[in-house]
Amino acid sequence: MKLKIVPLAAVTLAAFTFGIAGASALGYWITESKKEPAKVASGEFAGQADPGDIRGSYSFGDVEKAFGVPAAVLAEAFGFTDRPAAEIKAKDLEETYAGKTGALEVGTDAVRFFTAAWIGMPYEPEPDTGLPTRAVELLEGRNLHPATAALVRSRIVGGEPSFGTLSAAPAQTASPAAPASTAAPAAPTPAAPAAAPAATDTHTTAAAAAREVKGSTTFGDLTTWGLSRAQVKEALGGREPGAATEKVRDFCTAAGVEFSTVKTKLQEMANALPKP
């Protein structure tokens, strides 16, 4: 018995078409990823979308749909004017702000932090997460809870010295100036500089012992902590690590990899190392 080729092809095509239609109707056939953040499990905000689940692949348009924060506000807060606000992705901040914000970083976690503050939900940002001046100004117009307002101001990465951590530098400069006004005791002057390095060394030692992955962390730092090349390669998604002096954040930016994701993986590995 011979089968006719044309009818068999038609039957195959029909089966494939109706199969897709049926799978789509049942929710098994998905042609694009859905940007639906997880819900808060308990507490005052139980059932609401969790800003902490915003990922680097989320666009400002996705954030607007999930949390109600206008994409235009997010674009203004983070200084984007080169493209439609809804198309900007959270991970774009990492490349834009790389190497420009000092000790603090502006990346995906900054979008989570800003979003949570905007809608009035509590959120504890990562230790080195910062916010641009304009973002802080926009949030201050929201009548934030005093604790949230203080946290926001402490994370500013640029702008007026009256904000947050920027006021710390002038304050520290002013305090040594006060004893200088006493002209008679010239001897204490050499003693003051001697005390400062000791405090700095202590701080540096504590920071190193914490093994905290930051924007300034190099591949050499990771090796010093005890992470193997294989572990670092795993965190980089199979990519070979860079030179010892290269910053992990710079490597990720050049490779088009989301630093916040790599940072989280490396931090988990570092936390699992034996205590120094």
Image: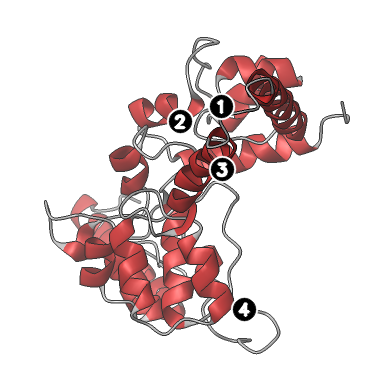
Amino acid beneath label 1 = Thr
- Mark positioned earlier in the residue sequence (3 or 2): 3
Relative depth, front residue between 35 and 81: 81
- Mark positioned earlier in the residue sequence (1 or 3): 3
**Residue 245 position (above or below residue 273):** above
Whole-Å distance between the Cαs marked 1 and 3? 31 Å
Q: Are marks 1 and 3 in contact (CB under 8 Å)?
A: no
Residue that badge 1 annotates: 217
Amino acid beneath label 3 = Ser
Amino acid beneath label 4 = Val
Whole-Å distance between the Cαs marked 2 and 1? 8 Å
Amino acid beneath label 2 = Arg
Whole-Å distance between the Cαs marked 4 and 3? 45 Å
Quadrant of the image occupied by residue 136: bottom left
Between circles 2 and 4, the one closer to the viewer is 2
- Mark positioned earlier in the residue sequence (2 or 1): 1
- Mark positioned earlier in the residue sequence (4 or 1): 4
Quadrant of the image occupied by residue 14: bottom left
Between circles 4 and 1, the one closer to the viewer is 1
Q: Are marks 2 and 4 in contact (CB under 8 Å)?
A: no
In the image, taking residue 38 as reference, residue 5 lies left or right, namely left
Q: Position of residue 147 (x, y in %)?
A: 58, 75
Residue that badge 2 annotates: 249
Residue 227 in view:
no
Disc 3 crowd, CA 10 A, few/some/many (<14, 14-19, 20+): few
Residue that badge 4 annotates: 40
In the image, taking residue 35 as reference, residue 82 lies left or right, namely left
**Residue 184 position (above or below residue 79):** above
Secondary structure of the residue carrying tag 4 is loop
Q: Are marks 4 and 1 in contact (CB under 8 Å)?
A: no
